[in-house]
Amino acid sequence: MTVLVAGAGIGGLTLALSLHQAGVPVKVFETATELRPLGVGINLLPHAVRELDELGLLAGLDRLGVRTAELAYYSKRGQLIWSEPRGEAAGYRWPQFSIHRGALQMMLLEVAQQRIGKENIVPGWHLADWRETGKGITAAFIDKKTGKPRGAAEGDLLVGADGIHSSLRRRFYPDEGAPIWNGAILWRGTARAKPYLTGRSMIMAGHEFQKFVCYPLSEPDEDGKALINFIAERKFAADHAWRREDWNRPGDPADFLPQFEDWTFDWLDVPALIRAAEAIYEYPMVDRDPLPHWTEGRATLLGDAAHAMYPIGSNGASQAILDARVLTREILAQGATPAALASYEAERRPATAKIVLANRQNGPEQVMQRVEELAPDGFRRIEEVLTPGELEETAANYKKLAGFDKDALNSRPSIVQLPQGAA
């Protein structure tokens, strides 16, 4: 019984580690010839951190990231709309982490190589085709740069964890087309700066059409500065002629810094943080429509390949990790069979579809847009704009939708329950 995984990102590597923990042989194939720590900061929510903790990775997360203590929303004038404790500070049994995506991926890769064996994580092999063969599946791979065949691999199941441009998804839905752009552009970067607020605060300021997000990725150094991850966002009209075909390209501060020049708050100097950036990258905010099915026979989708979503509510990586654990549970219960894939999809596809659609409506960040609409010139007291009950309800509803309601998470059993005596 062997599971073939296309994609060595966060979802694919978490799946590999989970299957190995459950005693299921696994082999991972990655398009890139060399895995490097790409990307910027992300947040891992407590329900995802629980799963990584159960894989024995909590100490590694602590070495690489910061335990988030607070989430706070502000208006474009820097006025506090809503704040709440996060992770352990909110009563969860597990922390929330702010962490560099590339550093997390490299940690997962290193642990996977140690546990599974380097020979079972194969770089430079891009999934090109596959076919079912009686009780199994054969996948064919190419060198994506040259198009030349790399070889084939046989297994019981094939999992496409190969991202928003998934080859497996394209095979299932050949007419789907490109990801859907919502008109927003994100400029993401990191800068060394003095900590703000609690020193472990994630903040969002602005509204739907102009927003600034930041959070620390490290503890302060000997100079008292921490590595701060930031995202500056502007939303344009649907017919705006932007470079929407370009991905992860170097960003130019001239395209967005002027709009943030007066965002100098008594608790954070936004333009100074942007000017201090070590590097800036530009991304269009895109997602994909929820699918009617993820699975065909012995092949299925996972992570962004299945449910690419807007980076709202800190759910992209977290949901991929949950996918991996639920799929492992079903393979442990039903074997590496189409029935296991069907059960996995029956649970995860509806749950993630709801999050994709909620994120299109700004998820919990909708309170920022409501404040902009109701009090564009500022307010004396937030209670005169939105009641505490409205703010609390918005936050609580999204937690339930995304699967990290505190009481439910703290009390539920583990997703992957290993046989007694298993590692």
Image (cartoon, grey):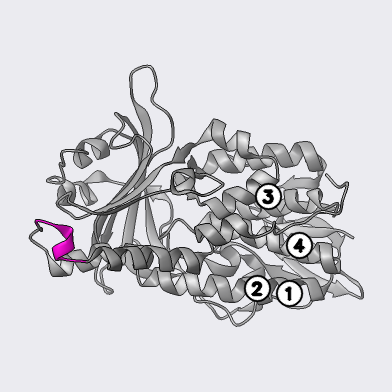
Q: Earlier in the sequence, mark 3 or mark 1?
A: 3
Q: Residue at image x 33%, y 45%?
A: 214
Q: Are marks 3 and 2 in contact (CB under 8 Å)?
A: no
Closest to the observer: 74 or 280?
A: 74
> Which image quarter is the C terminus in?
top right
Amino acid type, label 3:
Leu
Q: Residue at image x 67%, y 54%?
A: 12
Residue 277 in sight: yes
Q: Which numbered circle lies on residue 241?
A: none
Q: Which numbered circle lies on residue 347?
A: 2
Q: Earlier in the sequence, mark 3 or mark 4?
A: 3
Amino acid type, label 4:
Arg
| Range of magenta residues | 380-386
Q: Which residue is mark 4?
A: 329
Q: Are marks 1 and 2 in contact (CB under 8 Å)?
A: yes
| Percent position of residue 248, x then y | 43, 51
User: Which element type, helix, strand or loop, lies under badge 3?
Assistant: helix
Q: Residue at image x 61%, y 74%?
A: 349
| Percent position of residue 244, x then y | 37, 63
User: Which element type, helix, strand or loop, lies under badge 2?
Assistant: helix
Residue count near mark 3 (Cα–Cα under 10 Å), binned few <14, some 14–19, many ≥20: many
Q: Which residue is mark 1?
A: 343
Residue count near mark 1 (Cα–Cα under 10 Å), binned few <14, some 14–19, many ≥20: some
Q: In front: mark 3 or mark 2? A: 2
User: Which element type, helix, strand or loop, lies under badge 4?
Assistant: helix
Amino acid type, label 2:
Glu
